[in-house]
Image (cartoon, grey):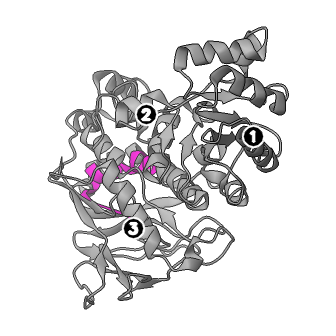
Amino acid sequence: MAPTDEAANPAGSTALLTDHYELTMLGSALADGTGRRECVFEVFARRLPAGRRYGVVAGTGRVLDAISDFRFTDAELSQLKATAVVDDDTLDWLAAYRFSGDVDGYPEGELYFPGSPILTVRGTFAEAVVLETVVLSILNHDSAVASAAARMSSAAHGRPIIEMGGRRTHEMAAVSAARAAYLAGFATTSNLEAGRRYDIPTRGTVAHAFMLLHDTEEAAFRAQVQKMGADTTLLVDTYDITAGIDTAVRVAGPELGAIRIDSGDVGVLARKAREQLDALGATDTRIVVSGDLDEHAIAALRAEPVDAYGVGTSVVTGSGAPTAGMVYKLVEVDGRPVAKRSEHKASRGGRKSALRRHKPTGTALEEVVYPTAKPPERGEHDRELHIPLMRAGQQVPQLPTLEDGRQRLRRALVSLPWEGLKLSGGDPAIPTTFF
């Protein structure tokens, strides 16, 4: 799991990520005694974002750290008292809060589909209900980013992608977005805090401001090469790309590591740049392109001589789907299934688990969601999806790492029917069956 020093909140506490209405329910349930009932809450998405064929689970590690660190500090309790959000009895209960329940769910890097029971939280109503906002805020954000990033990684077809969206989202969301993108196959990030916190490789080059700072493009290139060495990446499109490439190779020599193109028709420019670099003897110099790329733009560049991509805005905003649409619903009370019946928002009662059926070749056939107490007959190629995550309020030993999640996602994507990897709109890659 990730370090917990400030993993969820720079102020050092996750507790006031709780929503006001959760504390309203908490106070009332504690007062009438129902807060002590044993309950099961389930996280799932009713549907995938429009046109998406799969989703990627991300943020589980951050959720577990957030639950482990869920405490109400004296300052937070004083705020709740001063604003009369809760009464004194509820304040006393919050002051002693420690989650003591169990959590099961899909590990990070697993695929999910409509209705997949992504996370199951078991505990008293009181201790589980206050976790709704922190759990959903993490899973909805990280899974949205990872789902978009996985589509981009597939479109890149093995070419590395640099995550560089820190300037396009909230400063703390940028860190978790970098983590989710790395989980989904991005090679590196420009976000140094993500590198520090999650041990993600970091990379970066200069911006146009550095070029404009110097009196000439050549002076800027010389300053960068002198400091960083010839293997650096030079930004060649500040003025004229053709002249910029000539100057870059003259300054760094044919050993120049890479050039970056950040504007214009990058496909056409990359093709011309490759021809020019080869003619100058810089046959090993790589071409990096950036500038408002998404999975569709990356796919369109597959035939071009591009060696790496830099992606910012589209990945940190989920490429048009900034939330995974997950919900946190009560499905069981004291062993009795309960379900919401509201039109278009119905839920299925009872604690559930899931398995994925596969052909002997390894291709996924369907997602089977079933009552945990009544598992279906398991076939030779079926794979259970839930793993234990917390027991009695403690994270279980040897949980999957971020690198484990990267490898899991790679295997899962290979298992999809080929239609499931299309970027065009369509039905989920495999159907969900409820038993």
- Tag 1: amino acid: Ala
Which span is picked out in magenta? Answer: 117-138
- Give the residue number, with chain letter if any, for mark 2: 194
- Give the residue number, with chain letter if any, for mark 1: 279
Residue at 65% x, 14% y is 222
Q: Earlier in the sequence, mark 3 or mark 1?
A: 1
Left or right? Give the position of 292 relative to 152. right
Q: Under tag 2, what secondary structure?
A: helix
Q: Under tag 3, what secondary structure?
A: helix
Quarter where residue 78 is shown: top left
Q: Under tag 1, what secondary structure?
A: helix
Which labelled disc corresponds to residue 411? Answer: 3
Whole-angstrom CA distance, mark 2 to mark 3, is: 25 Å
Q: Is residue 52 magenta?
A: no
Whole-angstrom CA distance, mark 2 to mark 1, is: 39 Å
Q: Nearer the viewer, mark 3 or mark 1?
A: 1
Label 1 packing within 10 angstroms: few (<14), some (14-19), many (20+):
few
Q: Residue furthest right?
A: 240
- Tag 2: amino acid: Ala
Look at the picture and state if 176 lies above or below 77: below
Look at the picture and state if 302 lies above or below 431: above
Label 2 packing within 10 angstroms: few (<14), some (14-19), many (20+):
many
Q: Earlier in the sequence, mark 2 or mark 3?
A: 2
Q: Is residue 137 magenta?
A: yes
The quadrant the C terminus occupies is bottom left
Label 3 packing within 10 angstroms: few (<14), some (14-19), many (20+):
some
Quarter where residue 329 is shown: bottom left
Q: Position of residue 346 (x, y in %)?
A: 50, 74
Residue 123 visible in the picture = yes
